[in-house]
Amino acid sequence: MARIFRAVRLMLGWVRTPALEENGMTAWEFTFASIDGGALPLEQFRGKVMLVVNTASHCGLTPQYEGLETLYRSYRDGGFVLLGVPSNDFGQQEPGTAEEIKTFCTAKFAVDFPLAGKESVVGETAHPFYRWVVAEKGQEAAPRWNFHKVLIGRDGEIAGVYGSRIPPADLAVSIRAALDTPAA
């Protein structure tokens, strides 16, 4: 029950980032808003390997959507999920509405992986998932630009953090290694 209360406090922003380090939380305790509306609890992906990527439609790195979709299609049947998290934090490069973002992603890149609603990913207003990543791995794990990638293992722990310029294909070895590691 205490874990539930901690998760609710965290989702509502009632927990400051330093307190996250003491919680022993996993990624499965966070919930995003879905781009289609409603909740997108990460709990539904428990036991899978997950890549969380902050995305933007008007960025020089936007073509990474193609590589991300390729990763998703290549590994989803083996227990891999990819979550795109649109963010307007960097250069105002994701100004659209949820409907515009979804239409862009599906029409231009045939994106089939789940998309969250637009979120802040840095600073005090960052979604609690991103504050947790920083609390667990340090400030260097915070996104510095669009298409920053966080790999979550089957156990819900952070398995890797990758900068924006790392092409999605370069994560294949890490994803396979995480898929080969059983959940704790």
Image (cartoon, rainbow, N blue to C red):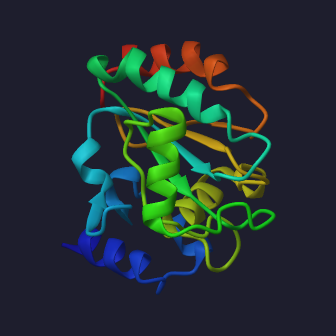
Q: Is residue 9 above or below residue 33?
A: below
Quadrant location of the N terminus in the rendered image:
bottom left
Whole-percent x, y for residue 167 in the image: 70, 25
Q: Is residue 57 visible?
A: yes
User: For residue 80, which quarter of the picture?
Assistant: top left
Whole-percent x, y for residue 102 in the image: 44, 53
Considering every residue shown, the one lying at the far front of the view is 107
- With 19 as the anchor, is 139 left or right in this view? right
Task: State the residue in front, 63 or 46.
Answer: 63
Q: Is residue 68 above or below residue 41?
A: above
Whole-percent x, y for residue 114 in the image: 37, 45
The residue at 62%/79% (across/down) is: 125
Q: Is residue 63 above or below residue 134?
A: above
- With 12 as the anchor, is 55 left or right in this view? right
User: For residue 142, which quarter of the picture?
Assistant: bottom right
Considering every residue shown, the one lying at the far left of the view is 1
Q: Is residue 158 visible?
A: no
The residue at 49%/81% (across/down) is: 15
The residue at 66%/79% (across/down) is: 124
- With 7 as the anchor, is 134 left or right in this view? right
